[in-house]
Image (spheres, grey):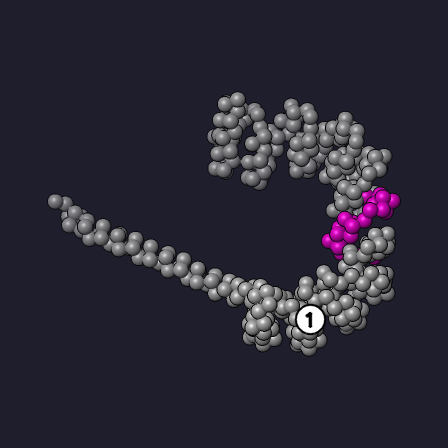
Amino acid sequence: MRFNDLFKFKWDHQKILGFKIFIVMVLSVFILIIFYLSTIASPYEKILKLKDECRGGNSKACAELADIAKHDEDYDMRRVAVHNITDQSLMIEIVKKDKDQDIRMAALINPSLADQDFLAEIAKNDVNSDMRKAAIKNPNFDNQILLAEIAKNSEDPKAPREIAAHKLKDKSLAQIVYADLFKNEKKEYSRIYLAWQLTDQALLSDIAKNDESASVREVAVLKLSDQVLLTEITKNDKSGMIRMKAADQLKDKSLAQSVYADLVKNNKDRLVRIEAADRLNDKDLAQLVYADCAKNEKDKWSRVYLVEKLTNQALLSDIAKNDKESRVRKAAKERLQELKKK
């Protein structure tokens, strides 16, 4: 017997003990996670249960739900309860008197709050712009006269004009408001949103040709129907992506194909070249683009995407052997197997 054999059983026993300890630790963590999730879920489930019972006519459930909404020490519990109560007078009381603005707003947007006069009062006169917005967002608020008044109020920079315009039944007025807001808005993300709301082709044409933001121009292009202008944009816009999106809108598909081919051959943005290649009817030209980008693209997931489009088996074999990323090599091998089955 070798010297090491004297300790073999002891070593095996230690490994088994260690494995048991590891399993116990994993199970303990799992149980703690389940317990934690249950402590989060159960209070909210309680509120939803109380809401259903209250709406079913259980006055005791209504009273308990109201008590949570007014007095519970847990902020989230109160907020959820306030959003689910059905007592109109209690909701109004919370909006008027509660010290926490978020709780007041939760009461305001409660879909059960339907007092039009009260909502109108808050929407028009509350000193806090967020409270005014919440009142307008209430799904029951439908005072079209007041909505129009708020939407047209260009003198107050904090007036929730955009939200009011969205609820207008007079779509012509809504478009006037969106156009005015767009012209005076400086934040790009807000101008993108407003551009999506616009339907005026003349204004969209001006935006598509002249806006300094490529993202805003792209939205306008997607909403254009003027074929002459779209053709002009495919030739002249400095953004390859916008030229491609304009080509997508063309009814002349042969012209669109020529735009895609030009982008594939001449654009410096590899992403634009790949997307244009995806649109090409000329599959041989598309394969040249995929091959070039598959060899030179730095992002591994982009290379995986390109490999899955390749038909050149020699190139795929090279990638399967030599690419530095295992996921790309695997994709190349799978693509080769797929092609060999055809």
Q: Residue furthest front?
A: 57
How packed mark 1 is, by other alpha carbons closer than 10 Å (few <14, some 14-19, many 20 or more), is some
User: Is 44 included in the stretch rendered in magenta?
Assistant: no
**Res. 233 in view:** yes
User: Is 190 included in the stretch rendered in magenta?
Assistant: yes
Residue 50 lies in quadrant: bottom right
Residue 26 pos. (x, y %) = 37, 56
What residue do we see at 73% from left, 53% from top? 189
> 73 or 22, which is in the foreground?
73
Residue 56 pos. (x, y %) = 59, 65
- Residue 172, above or below 324: below
**Res. 266 in view:** no
> 330 or 136, which is in the foreground?
136
What residue do we see at 65% from left, 23% from top? 284
- Residue 150, above or below 222: below
Q: Is residue 112 left or right of residue 196?
A: left
> 185 or 100, which is in the foreground?
100
Name the amino acid type tagged 1: Gln
Residue 226 pos. (x, y %) = 84, 37
Residue 128 lies in quadrant: bottom right
Quarter of the image with the N terminus in it: top left
What residue do we see at 65% from left, 68% from top? 86
Residue 187 pos. (x, y %) = 76, 56
What residue do we see at 67% from left, 35% from top? 275
Name the residue tied to disc 1.
88
The stretch in magenta equals 184-208
Question: Taken as a whole, is the magenta stretch helix, strand or loop?
Answer: helix
Residue 99 lies in quadrant: bottom right
- Element type at mark 1: helix
